[in-house]
Amino acid sequence: MTQEIKTRRTGADVKVGVIDTGIDYTHPDLKNSFKGGYDLVDLDDDPMETQPDQGMPTLHGTHVSGIIAGNGNMQGVAKEADLYGYRALGPGGRGTSIQVIAAIEKAVKDGMDIINMSLGNTINGPDWPTSIAVSRAIELGTSVVIANGNAGPANWTVGSPATAPTAISVGASTPPLKTPYLYDSFAGKVMELAPFMGAKPWAFERKYPIVYAGLGTEEIPNVRGKIVVMKRGVIPFAEKARAAEAAGAEGVIIFNNEKGLVQGSVADDKGEIGIPVASISEADGKWLVEQAEKGTYWINTNYQQTQDDIASFSSRGPVTANWDIKPEIVAPGAAINSTVPGGYMELQGTSMAAPHVAGGLALVKQAHPDWTPAKLKGALLTTALPLKNGDEYYEPIEQGMGRMRIEKAIDTPVIIYNSLLSFGKITNLSETKTVTMTVENVSNKTQSFRFDIPKKQAGLSFQLPQAFTVGPNEKKQIPITLKVNDAFLNEGIHQGWLTLAGDNDTYQLPYMFINQEADYPKVMGVEFALKLFSDDEYRYRLYLPEKVEQVTVDLYDPNQMSFDRTLLELDEPGQGVIEGALAKREIGKRGLYLANVRVTTNEGDSFDYQMELTIQ
């Protein structure tokens, strides 16, 4: 199940709270670890997973819990840790920011040493309410480990609350694994595939013809011997899969309706789907549909052996607004077998990587019970192993400091704080920025360090200190200065590594800066719905990472693609979470629309984002 851990530590007496869908505390591998918790959905002391008679059943929190503290046939990273469940997500894994924040507050009040949050949204900003709550929990002395998200491989896909600056944000790496992918040898096209949980494993060994069935909302004709391709949306994944299975399909491919792969599930109260189901990206899905519309088209599945790679689905950074490097560390998150109600299941996602780190953190906490959250985090990050993609390191915004190494974190003589060196956004033609990292010597022996001279790059140079020493149990602040000349650099993300050689180890320190502008989303999290308990007032909410001149929301007929009306126009709306209300008379007629959200920046540039919007 988990990364092999060679340590005598077991996590005993360390309290780990799991904020998730609940825990099946009757599972034989969890009943001895489980110590309590709270249900923030039903507001009682029973954080059991959603049962079939309560709605769409859940299993996610139980799977996460087994990775942390399973102690039976399957053992977690910290098998003797005290496990607490905080059910913030109800039937189908759905919940609200209010429930998540309440769960954080309750876990802190209950004295958790560590909180694991294998959950999040797509809002890439450090000041979303859940991110702020996480930061406050850490200030109060609780370490918080958060899944970075499953919207990779595109940049800027980290979501809240993993954007919280002081949280430990975790990306996913791969253990030894046989990974399926779709391949067209004639077109030379490779399509990444993300198998869904709750379905038969994707293990095809020959070609199959494909047929496109749209959203799956209409009856599917006989498709025996074929793989059905569908678009994500309107109806649940399980309903799409069952319709295809009933029509005789060999398998189902669901392509996303936004960037990245979706890590989905077809598990419901009707049991397992009897055919394989997987997702591909929106771009690959549209390409497949084009081929299918030209005539009979056959698709082939190939497999590759992977190990210590960054999983393609793992969300990438950086964070908008403060330009932090996220994730900060990675751990195994693909093909992870763990506990679920009634047995065991193999799942993948950063949801599986985060509990590896939460369990690892419990072992470090057991070894060093007086260490603060910052010190515990520093130990994990300082000792992580940077992973390589061939001969070169994966980028900092893909892996942070690298893969967790628990044994080294427990025994490290050195802790580096602020080891991920973000120099922020460069806005002038020539600019100098300084970041200060802190080196702490936790041993009884003087430690010596020196920076390797960075390779020369046009347009940027570093000013690094000469060799320095840090005495026993001493902390020393080390300034690192970057000089940038915009004339020699392209716009966008610039990143790399600085090498710090010590007496006992060599540390690869990631750095990053944004030159002038980058392709981050200019608006996120657009929501529009009736106000709770109201029939005549609508509430809207959106997130802006920077101040802009204007935001407009225009509605279009989704069938004719013709302009209908302007729903919302905000002049100089500010930065961060923007909320407001509209009266029913201002809304116009109800229905399903294609909304075009246009952001006009203070520099006069316009950016358009499309989304489906239902006015009820």
Image (tube, grey):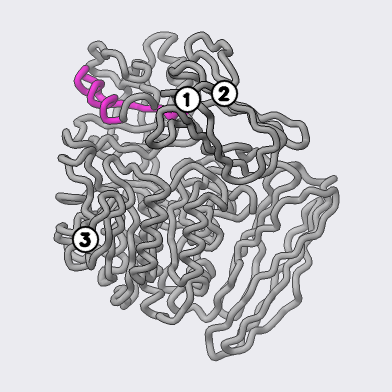
Residue at 50% from the left image edge and 54% from the top image edge: 131
The numbered mark, 1 or 3, whose residue comes first in the sequence reads: 3
Q: Position of residue 241 (x, y in %)?
A: 27, 26
Q: Residues within 10 Å of mark 1 (few under 14, many from 20)?
A: some
SS assignment at label 3: loop
Q: Quick check: is 462 in the magenta stretch?
A: no
Q: Residues within 10 Å of mark 2 (few under 14, many from 20)?
A: some
Relative side of 93 to 513, left or right: left
Q: Quick check: is 252 in the magenta stretch?
A: yes
* Residue at which label 2 appears: 567
Q: Kindly identify the amino acid type of the residue bearing the numbered disc 1.
A: Leu
Q: Which mark is residue 396?
A: none
* Residue at which label 1 appears: 613
Q: What's the distance in space between the residues labelled 3 and 2, CA to CA?
A: 54 Å
Q: What's the distance in space between the residues labelled 2 and 1, CA to CA?
A: 11 Å
Q: Nearer the viewer, mark 3 or mark 2?
A: 2
Kindly check if marks 2 and 1 are in contact, taking CB atoms under 8 A apart as contact. Answer: yes
Residue at 46% from the left image edge and 73% from the top image edge: 409
Q: Position of residue 456 (x, y in %)?
A: 78, 57
The C terminus lies in which quarter of the figure? top left
> Which stretch appears magenta?
237-257
* Residue at which label 3 appears: 74
Q: Which image quadrant is residue 252 in? A: top left
Kindly check if marks 1 and 3 are in contact, taking CB atoms under 8 A apart as contact. Answer: no
Q: Nearer the viewer, mark 2 or mark 1?
A: 2
Which of these two is toward me, 111 or 463?
111
The N terminus lies in which quarter of the figure? bottom left
